[in-house]
Each structure stands twice: as structure tokens, then as C-alpha cells.
Image (cartoon, rainbow, N blue to C red):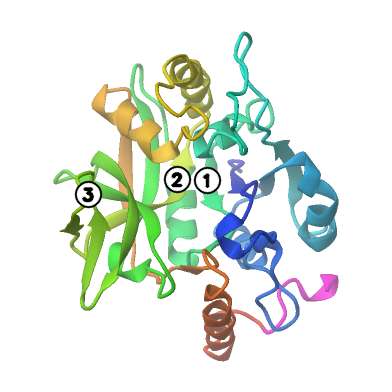
């Protein structure tokens, strides 16, 4: 059986959630957190290992809340993302407070992940459909000479918005074969009546089609991405420009560069499931109610991994 791994990015500092560890907030009726549901869906889809990317200072709490339980149902490993985990001859810029973004997070998996893998955020609920589609893609994915074979879950923008503030999404364009041709990392996306808008560089706003495909950082990669990330991180750090304390090495930007330089093909796999997550503290009530409805509708049992709670 082809081995596949779920990689969960959980090193975020949770600043917009009021300073707490938002990834560890209970949302299910028996204390389940969003990651419980993601891992449940991943196991059902066929994934057989999970790697948690966390900060070292979160390790004790993280293992107590979820890691130790998950070891009873799936192989578990950890990767640690730290601000000072840099290539030789590079230093942390003065004033920088947090790690270097999602690209650095996945790079931390080098040497730990040695099989095709899926990437997700810890604090996003994605629905079941995309887990199945990405798993099924990965078990047949094959890099060609000079061309990597990746995939991405494409969500409908209107299904991924928060009622409590702006969000960042990678707005996607595809060709007739539904291969990605462009991923534009767009921040400040929010509802404006029946429209969806985002700020522009000149201080104005632009409307975005709410039926656009967007990236929710749910990717399917072969291990070739780790080599690309390693090379790209050196290039990124060598040209930080102004405000290096704020620059981030981001997956959508990296993948977009690989597409445009002809190094990768990325298949967009459509998901019509509705996203929800705890980007803001006010989102939690919506998330709790949403899981209650999913349980009532029979999508999930009342207790996930019943023996382990």
C-alpha cells in the first residue's frame, strides 16, 4: 500500500485569536478540536501518518491536548518551526518576532516526511471531499524529468469567508485542464454586502468574484517540494529588501513561482464543501454550532475516536 502522510501546520502564534493557542480550542461536544476532525477525515481517506509542525514551546500542551491521543490511532511525528532555524550564514533580522511562514514550516519536514504528503492548516475545517481527492491523487502522482506533479484543493471563495473580519486567500486561475496558472496571495478579503472585496496597493478596493477558486493551504506534494523549498529559502533570505522583520516565505507564492518557471504542474481538485475555522475569537461559536449540525446530520459520530476520550 502506498504510504501517504498528513502534515498539519500548527506553529501559528494565534495573535488574531486574542493571544491564545487557537489550534487547541475545543469545538466538539466531547472536547474535540478542529484537528481531531481533520485527522479523522484523513484516516478515512487513507492517510497513514500525521506530522504536526509546532513550536518547541507548544510541545507539552500540544501533546497533552491531541498528540498523545493520536499516537493510539495513527503514526505521529513532530517537526519544529523556529524563527532562528535558518541556513548557514543567515541571522534573524532585528525586530522579527515570529517564524518565516508556511514555506519554512513545510521545509521543517525535510528528513521526516519521505512519502507523498498533504498539507493543511491546524485551525481550518475543510470537509471530507478534499481529503479523498488529494489522497487519491497522491497515490498515483509521479514527478517527470524537470516537472513536479502536485495538486491543490480549490475551494469556492464564497464558501471560505468569515463573518468576523478579513481573511487571506490564494486566489487561483486555471487553464482548460484545471491546471493552476496563477496563485495570487490576497489579504484583507471580506464581505461587503453581497460582494467580496479586497484592498489594493493604492488604498482603494477591488471586487473579487465570489465563485473564484481559492487556496486554503491544502496541498498535495511529492517530496520534491522539500528540495525546492530548501533552495528557495536561501534565495528568499538573500533578498529580503525593506522591512525584513515582516517578510514571509509563503507556500502559494512559492508554488506560483514553480508553475511560472515550468518546474511544476499543479492540478486543482475542486471542493464544494464549506470551510469554517477560528481565525477570530468570535468565530468559535459558529464553529461549535457547525460541528453540532454535522453530527446531527450523521456526517460524524458524536464521539470521534471513541475509545480515546
Q: Residues within 10 Å of mark 1 (few under 14, many from 20)?
A: many
Query: Is residue 270 in view?
Result: no
The range drawn in magenta is 302-309
Query: What residue does disc 2 label?
Result: 219
Alpha-carbon distance for marks 2 and 1? 5 Å
Q: Residue at 65%, 82% (x, y): give it.
A: 301
Real-space Cα distance between discs 2 and 3?
27 Å
Q: Are marks 2 and 1 in contact (CB under 8 Å)?
A: yes
Is residue 173 inside the magenta stretch? no
Q: Is residue 86 above or below residue 202?
A: above
Name the image quarter holding the C terminus: bottom right
Is residue 307 shown left or right of residue 280? right
- The picture places residue 16, in percent across and down from the top left corner, at 55, 60
Q: What is the x, y in percent for residue 275? A: 44, 68
- Density class for disc 3 (Cα within 10 Å; few <14, some 14-19, many ≥20) is few
Q: Which residue occupies 36% across, 53% down?
A: 169
Q: Position of residue 149 (x, y in %)?
A: 38, 33
Q: Considering depth in this image, is 20 or 148 the residue closer to the camera?
A: 20
Residue 245 position, x and y percent, is 52, 31
Q: Is residue 17 left or right of residue 206?
A: right
The foreground one among 137 and 289 is 289
Q: Neighbour class for label 2 at 10 Å: few (<14), some, many (≥20)?
A: many
* Mark sitting on residue 200: 3
Q: Nearer the viewer, mark 2 or mark 3?
A: 3
Q: Label 1: which residue? A: 118
Amino acid at each position: 500500500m502506498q504510504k501517504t502522510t498528513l502534515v498539519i501546520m500548527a506553529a501559528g502564534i494565534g495573535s488574531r485569536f486574542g493571544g491564545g493557542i487557537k489550534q487547541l480550542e475545543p469545538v466538539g461536544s466531547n472536547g474535540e478540536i478542529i484537528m481531531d476532525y481533520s485527522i479523522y477525515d484523513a484516516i478515512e481517506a487513507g492517510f497513514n501518518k500525521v506530522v504536526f509542525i509546532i513550536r518547541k514551546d507548544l510541545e507539552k500542551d500540544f501533546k497533552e491536548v491531541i498528540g498523545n491521543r493520536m499516537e493510539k490511532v495513527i503514526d505521529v511525528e513532530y517537526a519544529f518551526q523556529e524563527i532562528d532555524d535558518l541556513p548557514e550564514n543567515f541571522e534573524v533580522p532585528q525586530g522579527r518576532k515570529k517564524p518565516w511562514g508556511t514555506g519554512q514550516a513545510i521545509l521543517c519536514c525535510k528528513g521526516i516526511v519521505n512519502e507523498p504528503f498533504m498539507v493543511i492548516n491546524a485551525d481550518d475545517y475543510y470537509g471530507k471531499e478534499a481529503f479523498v481527492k488529494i489522497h487519491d491523487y497522491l497515490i498515483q502522482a509521479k514527478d517527470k524529468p524537470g516537472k513536479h506533479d502536485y495538486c491543490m484543493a480549490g475551494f469556492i471563495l464564497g464558501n471560505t469567508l468569515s463573518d468576523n473580519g478579513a481573511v487571506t486567500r490564494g486566489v487561483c486561475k486555471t487553464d482548460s485542464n484545471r491546471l493552476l496558472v496563477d496563485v495570487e496571495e490576497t489579504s484583507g478579503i471580506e464581505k461587503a454586502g453581497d460582494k467580496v472585496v479586497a484592498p489594493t496597493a493604492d488604498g482603494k478596493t477591488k471586487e473579487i468574484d465570489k465563485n473564484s477558486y481559492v487556496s486554503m493551504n491544502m496541498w498535495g506534494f511529492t517530496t520534491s517540494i522539500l528540495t525546492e523549498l530548501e533552495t528557495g529559502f536561501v534565495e528568499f533570505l538573500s533578498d529580503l529588501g525593506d522591512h525584513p522583520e515582516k517578510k514571509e516565505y509563503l507556500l502559494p507564492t512559492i508554488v506560483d513561482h514553480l508553475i511560472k518557471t515550468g518546474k511544476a504542474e499543479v492540478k486543482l481538485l475542486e471542493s464544494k464543501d464549506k470551510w469554517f475555522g477560528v481565525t477570530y475569537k468570535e468565530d468559535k461559536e459558529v464553529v461549535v454550532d457547525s460541528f453540532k449540525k454535522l453530527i446531527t446530520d450523521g456526517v460524524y459520530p458524536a464521539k470521534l475516536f471513541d475509545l480515546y476520550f
